Amino acid sequence: MLRRPANETVQVNLRIKESFRRRIEQSAEKAGVSLNAEMVRRLEESYRQEDLFAALKRQNFPQPQSETPVALRASEQQKFEQRIIDVIETTLKQEQEKK
């Protein structure tokens, strides 16, 4: 398989159900972008979320199904939220450096 530069835009043919294409098209129209742009945005977002969850897991954040109490004390909640923000910022910075 031909290896192209990572930042090169390539055409990919994709088979999807017509109902799914219509759904994406509606989202694209609502956002004021092309069908292609909406598909690319959604694919990129899914990988960003995957990377973020992996980064959170590496930081030993509690998983949603864990026995962590739902209501943390205010100070614990603030620390927890700050750790998440720090991980997100670091992940986004690393993502930008890859580009």
Image (cartoon, helix red, strand yellow):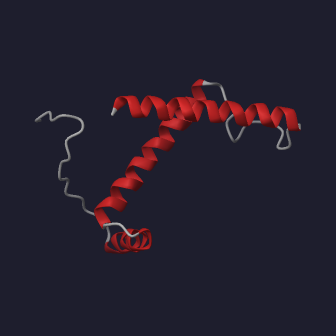
> Is the residue 59 above or below the residue 49 in the image?
above
Q: Which residue is found at the position 19% from the left and 41% from the top?
A: 8
Q: Is residue 50 above or below residue 20?
A: above
Which residue ends up furthest to the left in the rendered image?
A: 2
For the point 53% across and 37% down, the residue is: 52
Q: Is residue 67 left or right of residue 25?
A: right
Residue 69: percent from the left, percent from the top?
84, 39
Q: Nearer the viewer, residue 17 or 7?
A: 7
Quarter of the figure with residue 35 = bottom left
Q: Foreground: 87 or 16?
A: 87
Q: Residue at x 38, y 51 (%)?
A: 43
Front-most of residues 16 and 8: 8
> Residue furthest toward the right?
73
Q: Quadrant of the N terminus?
A: top left
Quarter in which the C terminus is drawn: top left
Residue 61: x and y in percent read 67, 30
User: How many numbered marks does the figure carry?
Assistant: 0
Left-right relation of 18 to 58 = left
Question: Which residue appears at 36% of the width and 61% of the height?
Answer: 38
Q: Quadrant of residue 53?
A: top right
User: Residue 94 location, x and y as percent?
Assistant: 44, 28
Compared to 36, does 22 lie above or below?
Answer: below
Vertical side of 66 occupied by 38: above or below: below
Relative to residue 20, is residue 76 drawn left or right?
Answer: right
Q: In the rendering, at what x and y percent does residue 6 appear? A: 23, 35
